[in-house]
Image (spheres, coloured by chain):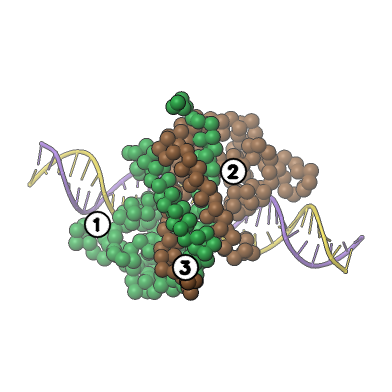
Chain colours: A brown, B green, C purple, D yellow
Amino acid sequence: MAEPHTAPGAQELLSGAALTSFRLNGRFLAVAEAMARPAGLTAARWQVLGAVLHEPLTVSGIARAMGMTRQAVQRTADLLVGQGLAEYRPNPAHSRAKLFAPTEEGLAAVRRIGPAHGEFATRLADALGPEELSRTVEAMRRLADVVESLEEPGSGE
Amino acid sequence: MAEPHTAPGAQELLSGAALTSFRLNGRFLAVAEAMARPAGLTAARWQVLGAVLHEPLTVSGIARAMGMTRQAVQRTADLLVGQGLAEYRPNPAHSRAKLFAPTEEGLAAVRRIGPAHGEFATRLADALGPEELSRTVEAMRRLADVVESLEEPGSGE
DNA sequence: CCCCCATTGACAACACGTTGTCAATTCGAC
DNA sequence: GTCGAATTGACAACGTGTTGTCAATGGGGG
């Protein structure tokens, strides 16, 4: 009963998953960009700043948490510091890997997005149903985990 | 019983959805890039070429089908033509909007990806279960549709 | 204590998606 | 048939993610 190889439909399923992921990414990116702009942020900067709202992290720590490359986070973080929205604090545990943390101005910028964020979240939950939204996120998380575990484990950077 | 405004948790749900979408996008992108490279393609070029495997389309038609901007597709399409993997054919219905179609070489490049594509698809379906994979894609599609319908409908380009 | 090696930051080159703008073409209203 | 709006292609500027490379730091084995 075991399929010998590539079951028919599996490729189409993978292609569909990837294409849908690309489309969804584009949509969320557009929405985030639109919400972040009035606060003087971009989607990427909001994302990076959002990662350290509760506790400062090193740049590579943020990269690991977000599943992005260290360099991408580094550049965005440097820009945020240049904007005065974040700062590097000395790291007692590592002189080279400084701690990245938002400034008061940075926190204010993130707070300014709150209302639009909440309004869109409400409309989304209304339109799709909070349970389905929650279930979808969970399913996407499982999918991401599996894909992550499948890309030859040891090819990082 | 109707929540007056922004139910607590809705914002976190939206943030989680967006962050997971970003992560998933990154994973699929990395996998696609790795599969496309040996065939002389990139993820984006594979995607555009894949859109016209069955029938030629205009550049803006591809953009609509993929949910991308016209200009992004245009540049990738021009690069593919420059690579000799696709060509513009005269469009009897529109002298300006030429028809974008793969060349024989372009078809060969896409075919060359087939094995790796099938192998990964099989491993993914094995690991997650074909039904769950299918269900997840469907849920993501619904989510993308809803988000699309929510970003003020009339702000296109 | 010293050396190897993983981690980390810095910098550069490249691919790609987005917005913005302009001219050419097409199509529908009149 | 003509005019105006919409579509389309071209081009440029920008933000962002990626890979690749290098030097500095830190930790663990000898």
Residue B132 is situated, as x and y percent measured from the top left of the image, at: 48, 56
Q: Decide: few, some or many residues near mark 1? Use Cα within 10 Å; few <14, some 14-19, many ≥20.
A: few
As rendered, which of B124 and B14 lies closer to the eye?
B124
State whether residue B128 is above or below residue B3: below
Q: Foreground mark, 3 or 1? A: 3
**Residue type marked 2:** Val
> Which residue is farthest front?
A1
Please, what secondary structure does the residue beneath circle 1 have? loop
Determine whether label 2 and label 3 are within 8 Å by CB. Answer: no
**Residue B69: assigned label:** none
**Residue B117: assigned label:** 3
Q: Is residue B154 visible?
A: yes
Determine whether label 2 and label 1 are within 8 Å by CB. Answer: no
Q: Mark 3 lies on which chain?
A: B
As rendered, which of B100 and B27 lies closer to the eye?
B27
Residue D2 is situated, as x and y percent measured from the top left of the image, at: 11, 43
Q: Specify whether disc 2 shares its chain with disc 3.
A: no
Which residue shows up at 46% across the image and 58% down it? B131
Q: Decide: few, some or many residues near mark 3? Use Cα within 10 Å; few <14, some 14-19, many ≥20.
A: many
From the viewer's perspective, tell me whether residue B55 is left or right of residue B28: left
Q: Decide: few, some or many residues near mark 2? Use Cα within 10 Å; few <14, some 14-19, many ≥20.
A: many
Of pointers 3 and 1, the one earlier in the residue sequence: 1
Q: Which chain carries label 2?
A: A
**Residue type marked 3:** His
Q: Quadrant of the C terminus of chain B?
A: top left
**Residue A48: assigned label:** 2
Residue A84 is situated, as x and y percent measured from the top left of the image, at: 62, 36
Q: Mark 1 points at which residue?
A: B96
Q: Is residue A120 visible?
A: no
Please, what secondary structure does the residue beneath circle 2 have? helix
